[in-house]
Image (tube, rainbow, N blue to C red):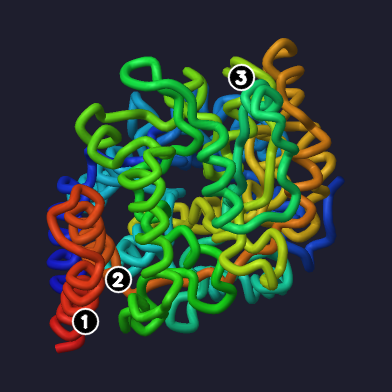
Amino acid sequence: MKKSLLVLSGILAISTALAGCGKSDTPAATDKGAGAATAAASAAPNKAPVTIKVQAWYTEAQGNWNATVEAYNKTHPNVKVVYEGMSEKGDSQEGMKKLDLLAASGEQMDVVMYSSASDFAQRVGAGILEPLDEYLKKDNIVVKDEYKIDPVVNGKYYALPGKMIEWFVLLNKDKLDEAKLPVPTDWTWNDYAEYAKKLTKGEGATKTYGSYFHNWKDYALLALNNDMDNPYLVKSDGTQNIDNPKVRYSLDLRNKLENVDKTSVPYFEVVSQKMAYRDVFYGGKTAMLATGNWMVGELALNAKFKTVFAPYPKYDAKDTNGLTEVGADFMGVAANSKNKQAAYDFVKWYTTEGIQTQGLFFSGWKKADINKNVDAILKSGKPDQVAMIDKDSLLATLKVNKATKLVVPPTYALQQEKDYLTQVELFLTGKQDLEKTITTAKTKLEDIRKSNAK
């Protein structure tokens, strides 16, 4: 417990530092599958109902949680599930910081979620999450057979994948038509750069760019994100992956588009003006936005113009079409929950049937039907906004998407990400060259790994 508290104090320090760049802006089965009916397990007769909390960063508008937990409660009368939002802004970093404070103070926690593999891994290291292996074994669930991604950590399971995140590119159809460009169906990052040139218009305050990259680590690893085996800046053992030529290519591409061709919003403007990627796209400031599939649900509520979809660009023309980084909301049971079985039952339901009931996100469950998933998301939107979503290009893109390997990194990976992004910022703002950026990043990531191996 002493070690867990020390690790948690470190997480609180890091999450405070990162809070400013959070992602604000995601029939009954047999008892042998992950979608099994769970009423019997959580609703034994003659027992008073138990209350369990689901705690995450989503606002009600972002997550439709009230209707989702109500649907569960109707079929599980001896359990009362309540959703407790951790951020009024829907900011994942703010929400996870509050969850860390709850864990440190001993407040009630039952079902908790984390928005990235790095954040999830750190909380596993801090002892915040309950191992689920015995529950899964009892239900005859083999995670890698039931789900599209396998969030195993050192041979154990501490969470199941909630919404599944795959990436693609959103394109403003009006701007494509104006430039007489077709909707891409199979393209490389070099093709993307050419599109960015042709889609950039004007000068000064009225300039519109072909491309926009946000300040997350995903945008500092563009080509690495579709590396099938090692799509992250460190490998699963924590050793650096900066030597991968796709890292150098990604940074060079960013510099070319932002500082040479001037066809992508410059990094300095992104951070100095605290740009929100949604606003940049909705406002027509950029014609293209590489982003995650959570944006389908958001477009269904907020679309301003006809939006089409293209697969995530390839590093090499010979690569498989549709390779994309993969992510998820990692949903687990709090180690200090007093109702672990009931919490686990909800986790199992939500990560299978529940997401489809929620109707906003894409499921990581292998048995989910992609067509029905899309229809449910679009049904939850506003008719005028849904009409602006090109369903044909969306489905075509989703069906060619192929997730790369999920890397659940070491518990100290957030610090490695932070140090890497510091070097990337120095490069993109012209304060150091590419060679120094690569060399320094490698050294810093290895230093962090070695210091944590002691």
Residue 70: image x %, image y %? 63, 28
| Residue type, mark 2 in image | Thr
* Residue 224 badge: none
Q: Which residue is depicted at the point 17% across and 73% down?
A: 440
Q: Earlier in the sequence, mark 2 or mark 3?
A: 3
- Mark 1 vs mark 2: give the one in front: 1
Depicted 335 relative to depicted 453: above or below: above
Q: Which residue is depicted at the point 16% across and 64% down?
A: 5
- Residue matched to label 3: 303
Mark 1–mark 3 distance (CA, rounded to whole Å) = 43 Å
Q: Which residue is depicted at the point 32% across and 62% down?
A: 123
Residue 72: image x %, image y %? 66, 37
Residue 428: image x %, image y %? 25, 51
Q: Is residue 379 left or right of residue 76?
A: right
Please state which of residues 322 and 182 is positioned toward the viewer in this rendering: 182
Please state which of residues 88 and 386 is positioned toward the viewer in this rendering: 386
- Residue matched to label 2: 411
User: Which element is circle 3 on?
Assistant: loop
User: Which element is circle 2 on?
Assistant: loop
| Residue type, mark 3 in image | Ala
Mark 2–mark 3 distance (CA, rounded to whole Å) = 38 Å
Q: Which residue is depicted at the point 41% across and 78% down?
A: 244
Please state which of residues 312 and 189 is positioned toward the viewer in this rendering: 189
